[in-house]
Amino acid sequence: MTDPSGLAPYASDPAEVRGRLHGERESAFRSPFQRDRDRIIHSSAFRRLQHKTQVFVVHEGDYFRTRLTHSIEVAQVGRTIAGVLGLNQELTEAVALAHDLGHTPFGHTGEDALSDLMAPYGGFDHNAQAIRIVTRLEQHYAGWDGLNLTWEALEGIAKHNGPVTGDIPWALAEYVARHDLELHTHASAEAQVAALADDIAYNNHDLHDGLRAGLFSDEEIAALPIVGECYGEVDALHPGLDPTRRRHEALRRVFGVMVEDVIAESRRRLAALGPESVNDIRAAGAPVIRFSEGLWRELKEIRAFLFARMYRAPSVVEMRARVTSVVRDLFPIYMQDPALLPEGWRGQIGPGCGEVARARLVSDYIAGMTDRFALQEHARLIGQGRQGEAEGDRPAGR
């Protein structure tokens, strides 16, 4: 049963929000979760996603997904699923829009490079970095650093992929020491929806982008489970359809199959659990928002195809190697000469700033770069007249 607001009893109720780290008066006309969403959209980090890689580096083409368009697609899918399940759409949307804020330039390639470089200094994790961004690095408000999001939004960003156990990334541990996000439990159903919406979005749009890039053909993906049935349905309804329209019609049906499966499976799990509150969801011991086992097996086959034909395609691997060198070159340059950082950044390096603190500052700076800015900085610092400086022969004090 849902209450008059349309929310199920296990939904996150904005009237029962667990507060913000810094107390503030709430809006008279926006719910706490709407304010979370709006603050994320207006953040600098969110705008920078426009020029951050999803799979293809942004200068490779105007039509490929970026982290920004991906995040918008995730939010759209998440709102749809949340609405059907009686969950809070604004919280779902907030978590979806924020889930990739911590990504480096050049996507997972940049993250892998920065993670290796940061290994002596506590490592790097993009989910933990998202928490660092929304709680510290966004510095626009008079009364606090960060966006001062609700506990529920922060929980969702930190735990949308499940409980965080074992070695907690330092950026996350640093925050939860001040504001306990109960990392050992599952997150709300809204955050779980955001995680599954992420899977749905990239499974679909990576097929689309791979086709546009010419890495595989419609005929090849039509041999995959789910996808083949969708192409067959389009051909039966619209024989002789223009190839571009045929592709779009088929892939939007793939989208629909995944969304409908998550809704059906989640309804089944929720009915079996019978949760009466959002805390029942957190204490369930397993996710309640899931794909069915059958569809999950089919998606694993699609992911294996994409891994072999797209993520490990020679052209993609070549670009990965090029952009990896950008991150690997920039990090030691800033570490050796922090004066090269912008004034607002180098001003944070005082006489007592140790190597770990300096490395984490440099990591924050590089992680926040867009693809194009990282390439520009690399050209400026490693360009003509400065060749070889990355190997440590840069003049002292420069």
Image: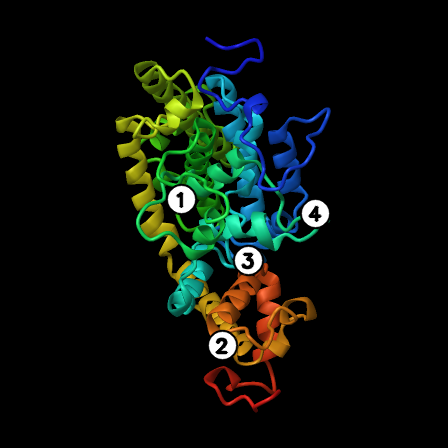
Estimate the x, y position of residue 44 in percent, counting from the top left: 66, 51
* Position of the C terminus by quadrant: bottom right
Instruction: Find the distance from the CA under tag 4 to the CA under tag 3.
Output: 41 Å
* Residue receiving disc 2: 332
Residue 339 against residue 6 in the figure, above or below: below
Q: Mark 3 points at which residue?
A: 60
| Residue corresponding to mark 4 | 143
Quick one: 150 or 110, which is closer to the camera? 150
Left or right: residue 269 compared with residue 11:
left
Q: In this view, does 230 lie to the left or right of 139?
A: left
Q: Mark 2 against mark 3, which lies toward the viewer? A: 2
Amino acid type at image mark 4? Gly
Frontmost residue, 200 versus 277:
277
Instruction: State the residue in front, 284 or 373.
Output: 284
Q: Distance between the residues labelled 2 and 1?
A: 42 Å
- SS state under label 4: loop
Toward which corner of the image does residue 250 lie, by quadrant?
Answer: top left
Q: Which of 69 and 329 is in front in this view?
A: 329
Kindly indicate whether the residue at mark 1 contacts the one at mark 2 (C-beta within 8 angstroms). no
Q: Is mark 3 on a helix, strand or loop?
A: helix
- Mark nearer the N terminus (2 vs 1): 1
Q: Which residue is drawn at 40% across and 28% down?
A: 258
- Res 217 label: 1
SS at circle 2: helix
Q: How is the image coloured?
A: rainbow
Residue 125, given in percent of the width and then of the height, sits at 43, 55
Which residue is drawn at the image coordinates 39% and 41% (left, top)? Answer: 183
Tell me the mark number nearer the camera, choosing from 3 and 1.
3
Amino acid found under the numbered disc labelled 2:
Pro
Badge 1 amino acid: Ser
Which of pointers 4 and 3 lies earlier in the amino acid sequence? 3
